[in-house]
Image (cartoon, rainbow, N blue to C red):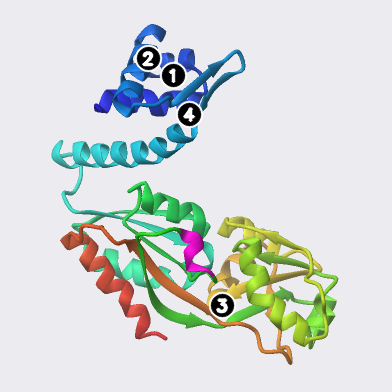
Amino acid sequence: MKIHQLKAFVAVADCHSFNEAARLLSVSQPAVAKTIRELEVWAGRQLVIRSPRGTQLTPDGVALLRRARGILDQVARAEHEFAGTGPRDHVSLGLTTSASMAATPILVDFKARNPDIGCTVLGGSRRPLVEKLYNHTVDLVIATLPDNLEEMGTGLRFEPLLRLPTVLTVTKGDPLENARSLADLIQAEWLFAESEQSFDFNFRTAFAEAGMDRLPSFTRCESTFLMLALAARPNTVTVWTGPAPSAVTPQLKMLGSDISSLHLKEKLPAITVCVVHRSDLIITPAIQRLLDQVRRLKDAA
């Protein structure tokens, strides 16, 4: 297996076409086809299926693609560092929307204390970010703890950092401001940053205790900026964690809106924020510094 073979393979997977991959790599189409055949000989199995409708990966091809992206990412990092165009020490972090409000001050402090360390921060939901852990695209992920650790796969370490209260908000002046029970909110549109499974896990018991046998409809949103805009809509209940409402209030006021926290009789679930990394992660000095900084969240609990 060679680097140029992996580059060709990833290009074919992304373009769904040998011709488009060749154009992207500035080589001929026969050269791409030959490279893929060589990679399949190395693998001992078919990786790509060609058809008039384009190319598709076999299950083995999908498995190799995850590894290939990780390998190419590491090669790109090495080329960047040893070319002298960037800092030698670098750390990459994945940050879910729900965990971002609690972690942001810690990360800002980390950059202030370690200006010599390059840092890449990727946002999104938990599952795609964990996939990037497997791909070696990110070193650490700060996320809410899943209700079922097994669904995240094997070879990962989860370290709980803190428990954050769940806070519900509505737009100021909205009739929903008068709600005192989850039952008063069943007809509202809910806005949530996590998955449908997380919403069900965290709120089904609370709604059952309020006498509700079903959950309200909700919109899942991974973008903090879009979440701010949607949180300002009428008849919308937004689910935040910890200090999020006070942190986003200035941005909402810039949008010409404001929010109000609800105080309900039901006890809302607390959310666990954790740091996740691969069990085989090589802890470099830069990663260790970031881990030490992230663990300060425990002191804030």
* Residue extending furthest toward the front: 44
Kindly report the distance in space between the C-alpha atoms of the residues bearing marks 2 and 1. Answer: 7 Å
Residue type for callout 1: Ala
Q: Which residue bears the numbered disc 3?
A: 246
Residue 105 painted magenta: no
Labels 4 and 1: the sequence-earlier one:
4
Q: Secondary structure at mark 3?
A: helix
The answer to which image quadrant residue 43 occupies is: top left
Residue 101 placement (x, y as % from top left)? 49, 70
- Quarter holding the N terminus is top left
Q: Nearer the viewer, mark 3 or mark 2?
A: 2
User: Within 10 angstroms of label 2, few (less than 14), some, or many (20 or more) residues?
Assistant: many
Q: Which residue bears the numbered disc 1?
A: 21
Kindly report the distance in space between the C-alpha atoms of the residues bearing marks 4 and 1. Answer: 8 Å
Labels 3 and 4: the sequence-earlier one:
4
Residue occupying the point 25% across, 58% down: 281
